[in-house]
Amino acid sequence: MGDGDGDHGRTVSGWLRGIEVFAGPLPEFEPERAPAHPVQLFLSWLSDAVADGLRDPHAMTLSTVDEAGDPDARVLILKGVDGSGWQFADPAERDHALAKSLALIEQAPSLVDSAWTLYTLAPAEVEFWQAAKNRVHTRLRYERTADEGWERFRLWS
């Protein structure tokens, strides 16, 4: 990658620009045909990722903020998904800021080792993003309604 001249930023930048973006075929996504509930679409996409051999398709990022508004993110493994939300486990002993954030998320009966706690994140919004080679990406947002249903919104394209 480099020629040893010490100008790593320029070398890395050129190298990164040379990597093809959205290489290979991209799946078709027609938001108007998306199911009424985001869990159904998520499970369909997850199933496709597993079938395509994507490594660690159940890895997820949980982001929280502390009292000062400072963000924290960690990668976790998805433990389940159903109509109530997305489930993940976190060590029972965790840092204070994350503990306060997680206290806002519904705890589920433990289906994991006792050193871990299983949580269910019940989202108010869920967004799906499908890349397009022409960079007019497809975005679909589900928003929870007052009657616990879902409304869909196409964000652009």
Image: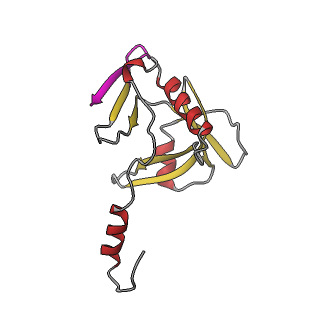
Say if the magenta span includes residue 144: yes
Residue 108 in the image, given as x and y percentages of width and height: 62, 33
Residue 77 in the image, given as x and y percentages of width and height: 60, 45
Q: What residue appears at the point 34 percent right and 42 percent down from the top-left corner? A: 133
Q: Is residue 115 left or right of residue 129?
A: right
**Above/below status of 148 relative to 1:** above
Instruction: State how many labels appear.
Output: 0
Q: What residue appears at the point 59 percent right and 48 percent down from the top-left corner? A: 55
Q: In which quarter of the image is the C terminus?
A: top left
Q: Is residue 98 left or right of residue 51?
A: left
Say if the magenta span includes residue 105: no
Choose between 136 and 103: the one closer to the eye.
136
Q: In which quarter of the image is the N terminus?
A: bottom left
Whether residue 79 appears in this view of the structure is no
Q: Is residue 151 left or right of residue 84?
A: left
* Extreme-right residue of the structure: 113
Choose between 123 and 22: the one closer to the eye.
22
**Above/below status of 83 relative to 106:** above
Q: What residue appears at the point 56 percent right and 48 percent down from the top-left corner? A: 76
Q: Give the range drawn in magenta.
A: 143-157
Q: Is residue 153 left or right of residue 63?
A: left
Whether residue 6 appears in this view of the structure is yes
Q: What residue appears at the point 48 percent right and 46 percent down from the top-left corner? A: 62
| Res 50 → quadrant | top right
